[in-house]
Amino acid sequence: YYGLSLLDMSKKKLNYVRFKEVEEIIESLKVAVKHADSNIRNKLELLQAELHGLGARHNEAVALYNAAIASAKKSKFIHEQGLACERAGLYYKKMGCARDALVHFQQAHACYKEWGSSVKVGAIQRELDGFNSIGTNFI
């Protein structure tokens, strides 16, 4: 999660050192995934998706968000599946893809609800309410 935090900070202020550190974390995760694939793969894919999203590599980002969601689901990490859906939703929202953002926020909402996190359910509900308030009715 440290890598995701670094990328969030980098979004606010481009910082080469932070990007370099994220790339080092990705390399460490690539080694770890060889030993604990089901525990690590979704984290690696999510971090890579976020990095590709910052680098305007849309196709790679989308493929990696989808892979992270699938890996977390396969490993039955419902909270990490929710996180991957949420981050994908935020990415799509930033890209102006309302329909894709909405779908991913709905999936994140369902995951967080199943996980039992009322705080995360509330946060995602606010994202969903934002779509309703602007008249975007894809539900």
Image: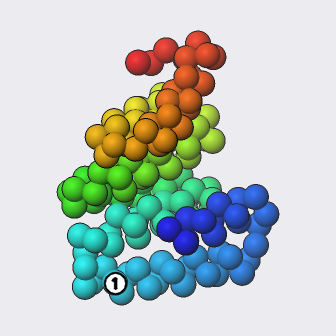
Q: At which x and y percent is residue 121?
A: 44, 37
Residue 107 vs residue 61, the one in the foreground: 107
Query: Image quadrant of residue 56?
Result: bottom right
* Image vertical order of residue 117 relative to residue 20, above or below: above
* Image vertical order of residue 80 relative to residue 118, above or below: below
Query: Image quadrant of residue 106?
Result: top left
Q: Residue at x 34, y 43 (%)?
A: 116
Q: At which x and y percent is residue 8?
A: 65, 60
Look at label 1 and name its amino acid.
Ala
Q: Is residue 16 visible?
A: yes
Q: Residue at x 44, y 61 (%)?
A: 46
Q: At which x and y percent is residue 83?
A: 43, 51
Residue 19 vs residue 56, the one in the foreground: 19
* Image vertical order of residue 80 relative to residue 89, above or below: below
The C terminus is located in which quarter? Answer: top left
Q: Give SS at disc 1.
A: helix
Q: Is residue 104 visible?
A: no
Q: Residue at x 46, y 84 (%)?
A: 27
Say whether residue 16 is left or right of residue 98.
right
Query: Image quadrant of residue 15?
Result: bottom right
- Circle 1 Cα neighbour tier, 10 Å, few/some/many (<14 / 14–19 / ≥20): some
Q: Residue at x 56, y 30 (%)?
A: 126
Say whether residue 61 is left or right of residue 6.
left
According to the picture, the residue beneath numbered tag 1 turns out to be 32
Q: At which x and y percent is residue 127?
A: 55, 32
